[in-house]
Amino acid sequence: MMDTLYGLLIAPFAEFAFMQRALAGSLMLSLGACPVGVFLMLRRMSLSGDAMAHAILPGAAAGFLFYGLEILPMTIGGLIAGIIVALGAGAVSRFTIQREDASMAAFYLISLAIGVLMVSIRGSSVDLMHVLFGTVLALNNEALTLIGGIVLVTLVSLAIFWRGLVAECLDPLFLRSVSRLGSPVHFIFLGLVVLNLVGGFQALGTLLSVGLMMLPAAAARFWTMRVEPMCVLAVLIGFASCVAGLLLSYHVSLPSGPAIILSAGVVYFASILFGTRGILRARIIHHRHRTA
Amino acid sequence: MTKTCLTFRDLTLGYNSHPAIHHLDGTIRRGSLTAVVGANGSGKSTLMKGIVGVLKPMAGTVVRAPGVRAAYLPQQSELDRSFPARVVDLVSLGLWPRRGLLGRYTREDRDSVSQALMAVGLGGFEKRPIDTLSGGQLQRTLFARVLLQDADLILLDEPFNAVDTKTVGDLIALIKRWHGEERTILVVVHDLELVRQNFPETLLLARQPIAWGETRETLRPENLLRARRFHEAWEENAPWCEPDKHGDHGHDHAHDHHHGSGPRAA
């Protein structure tokens, strides 16, 4: 019995170095990306994460075109493209009448088109699949160091700007009346989104990295009424999804990225149903009420 | 030490090149309690935004005396009520001027948050999620935040909306306490009876000041009549206001809005 459990849950990680690297990389990624996802969701920018993930493509593709499947050039390229789109869309929404959803859509579509164009100039669709869907099972030391650095920057920035970020989400007009930090905080936050997506595309690909950012956050929303526990819970859900997804991918030979995201998807649906603020609680248990 | 808290110099505020406050000159005395009165669209909220600095002037300036910190309760807050926060989290934002981005909240800060909630009659509401508050309770929560900001200049834009009579009394008492503490207060109010009873000074606006001074003088029937006759709508083709033409009110310029007659020249 214990042997079976060991064989199912522990052995894949204990025996194979590539599984250990995959686990380390994806866990670190969750640590940074999930809290960022919580704030994206609370700012009603959940789909912006998706848009940003597309926006990274031309930068990553440029790195890929010039240097091949190398981590550093692709990451730097993705970072530059993401920051241009984030700053551009953010600036348009801050300084014109257009809302961020529209400006973000415009910028990312242009960016995505450029990216697809660049990949199609040289390379096959197999290359494109590499960029889009990542390679969590082939993380090298370079990639792990990069992800580690990104997580560190993310957590430190969140700790420093936490109060400003909460104020900017909760009551932006108030923040503007007492401080000039509103706009900087918003742009720093967009920067963190880009950073984490870029970190994620090594492991999960540009399209799936946004899943690890958003799904745990969306699931955590059904369990708590406060931001701090929501972030912690999102990270824990992210951890669980990574472990479950990697094991699933190992035992059933599934691609690892989708397996991780689908595990998070299962948690999301379970949370909708069974969360303390989920459907079943609201419909069934709340028929009882107190006297005051 | 100067006695002036705010100075308006030829201040014009507005939207899309149309003025909502037109060439306002004057000063607000330190420690004064002023009601800002006027019809819809007469520029009351716009003036508040201009003083706080969230709306940049189209012309002229608002000058705050050095070191004056403002607290602002907007008419339409951009508060996101679906954000997972408790009453105490919202009120604690009022500690920003004292603690800023990184300062740790002390035990004393937490006590002052509770006291502020007590003062607006919301003792024991600390842990309530903000999406469960009624409109009036939310308004009082925001009042508590203003209280906590401990500002020298307090700007309240229609603070008595959706608030029941008893609470209006409580909030007026709070405003009078601030007045007693020599803070400078401007309040946008619609209820003239309330103004007559509680506010020593009044600014009557109709895009420009109709009358400004002691409340009983300002709210005389002829002034109110003039304020009511002002033309609320913009005129798309109103002539441009030339910089050299204003300032000598009393002459009849093509663009002059004097005496509440509105921009009818075109």
Image (tube, rainbow, N blue to C red):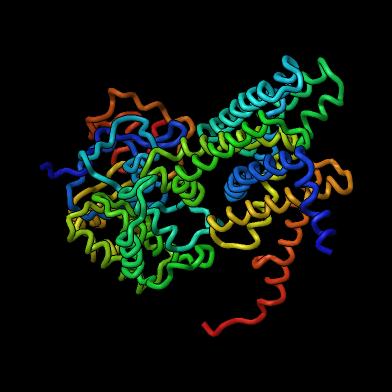
Q: Is residue B216 visible?
A: no
Residue A111 drawn above or below residue B7: above
Residue beneath the point at 82% across and 15% down: A122
Task: Tell me which residue sits at (62%, 56%) in the image.
Answer: A233
Q: Nearer the viewer, residue B265 or B46?
A: B46
The answer, for residue A210, to whether it is visible in the render is yes
Vertical arrangement, residue A4 with respect to residue A209, above or below: below
Taking the image as shown, residue B36 lies to the left or right of residue B214, namely: right
Give above or below for A169 relative to A64: below
Where does the image place residue A202, in percent across and percent down from the top left? 71, 32
Position in image of residue B212 (x %, y %): 22, 48
Vertical relation: B115 (above or below) A150: below
Q: Position of residue A31 (x, y in %)?
A: 61, 46
Q: Position of residue A100 (x, y in %)?
A: 60, 38
Q: Residue at 48% across / 39% down in the picture? A: A185
Nearest the eye: B5 or A132: A132
Q: Residue at x 51, y 48 (%)?
A: A169
Q: Quadrant of residue B83?
A: bottom right
- The quadrant of the picture occupied by the N terminus of chain A is bottom right
Left or right: residue A275 versus residue A1 is left
Residue at the bottom extreme? A291
Q: Which residue is more in the foreground, A250 or A231?
A: A250
When asked about the image quadrant of residue B214, the answer is bottom left
Residue sitting farthest toward the left: B1
Q: Left or right of A230: which side holds B135?
A: left
Q: How many marks on residues?
A: 0
